[in-house]
Amino acid sequence: MPDISVSSQIFDLAFHPTSSVVYTAHLTGSIHSFAYDDATGESTPGFTLRPTKRSVRALALSPDGGKLYAAGKAKAIHTIDTTTGSITSTLPSAHNAPINRMLHCTPQLLATGDDDGVIKLWDPRALSAESKPTREYTHHFDFVSDLLWLDDKKQLVATSGDGTLSVMDVRSKKTEPFAQSEDQEDELLSILPIRGASKFVVGTQLGVLSIFSRHKGWGDCVDRIPGHPHSVDALCSLPSSYPSSSNTLLTGSSDGLLRVVELFPTKLVGVVADHGDWPIERIKVDRAGEGRWVGSVGHEDVLRMTDLREVFEDEDGEEGDADAKEEESEDEEVAERDEQFASPRRKVIAPSALDADSSDSESDSDDEAAPATTIVVDPASDSDDDGDEGDEPVEPTEEEAQAYADSDSDEGVKEKEKKRKKKDKLSGRPAKKGRNDVGAVDKGFFSGL
């Protein structure tokens, strides 16, 4: 993993939208830029500047990447030219409290949120020492943890440590929010849209992912998804080129693990990066969220760069191996079942033998060593094997012979059919569900042999 080591703790990061450049904000008040290789992730340092002696907590880039905005504990907003690496303007005392979050919404709109819950809107095209906010919202009473822009409705969504979520319509001149949720009885730390911005995932201090639905209103969450053992401080979406990107997201937790989580149904896909015992504060994907590299920072002096392609290719390979093993086990199971159901060759009785009398059939069945032969018996005449040798055979009358032959042959056939039904276990087997089960055997197949 091509990590970028720095000299102090990183609070925030920002990727250039079109170039392979990343910017980091530090505890010491400095801002660093690094150029990295798209294929390997190896980095080379760029410019370094220190606009303030206090920590820089938030970074935001213009849509074209030409301007970088920085804010932090000094309560000021600095504008930096990314081409020259110089500060072009500084707006001191932009807030009365340290600025915690900043978001570049449109070319005409820049939003900032501070530790007191105050949200201000600015025009980034004319930022200077005398600039005034175009709008100010004071409905939150605790720190602003995250900001989200909804371009279709021109609305700004904010999460706060006071346990509420608010929606502000920037087209309205009112300083009250368009909507605000009920107290969720937990600190809301991060927010991310899913399913085409019809639903929103909110990370909380207790590690529960709260689901809000735009169609059902912002008053309360519609679902809660537990699973993270610690707080979910950062959320980030996957590039749209990956499967199930509308339901899959990256989560950064205070336990130091960067996870890939799939929602609806909920599934932990895997762990992307491990920061050890250091909490993860920020997650970003390069190329405006459509690249291959994800950067994550925490309370350590390292920017971790993870190649998403390697992560998902490894998972695809593991899934392929698992599928191959599963298919192999299924083949073995089929072979075992076939061997189990395979029966030895059975003795086939010729159809003509069914017309023999019962005494002949019983003597033939008792003699196992004798081969199966076809026996033809004239039903009109019958010899008594058990009679004395000296006795002369008595010629029965025609009516007695016919009656004896009819009754004897019927009993013989019935007896044969009972024995065949008893011995033929497969012919009467009921059909079972499943592709490996043996179906019923056609009786006509054996009767034709």
Image: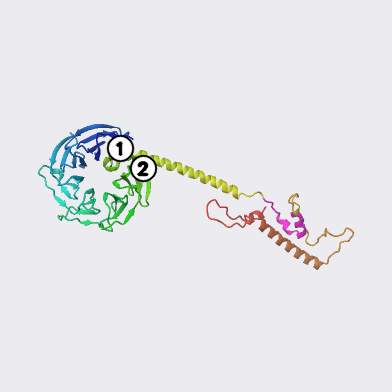
Q: Is residue 376 in view from this perspective?
A: no
Q: Is residue 305 above or below residue 342?
A: above
Q: Can residue 26 be found in the magenta stretch? A: no
Where are the magenta residues, as a range? Answer: 346-365
Q: CA distance from mark 1 to mark 2?
A: 14 Å
Q: Is residue 237 above or below residue 175?
A: above
Please give the name of the residue rendered at 86% of the width and 61% of the height, measured from the top-left corner.
393
User: In the current view of this chain or complex, which residue is farthest to the left?
Assistant: 130
| Mark found first going from the N terminus, 1 or 2 | 2
Q: Position of residue 238 (x, y in %)?
A: 31, 44
Q: Secondary structure at mark 2?
A: strand
Q: Position of residue 107 (x, y in %)?
A: 18, 45
User: In the current view of this chain or complex, which residue is farthest to the right?
Assistant: 390
- What amino acid type is highlighted by mark number 2? Val
- What amino acid type is highlighted by mark number 1? Arg
Q: Position of residue 56 (x, y in %)?
A: 20, 40
User: In the current view of this chain or complex, which residue is farthest to the top?
Assistant: 44
Using the image, tell me which numbered label, if any, was put on residue 271: 2
Can you identify the residue that label 1 sits on?
A: 304
User: In the current view of this chain or complex, which residue is farthest to the bottom?
Assistant: 399
Q: Is residue 420 above or below residue 307?
A: below
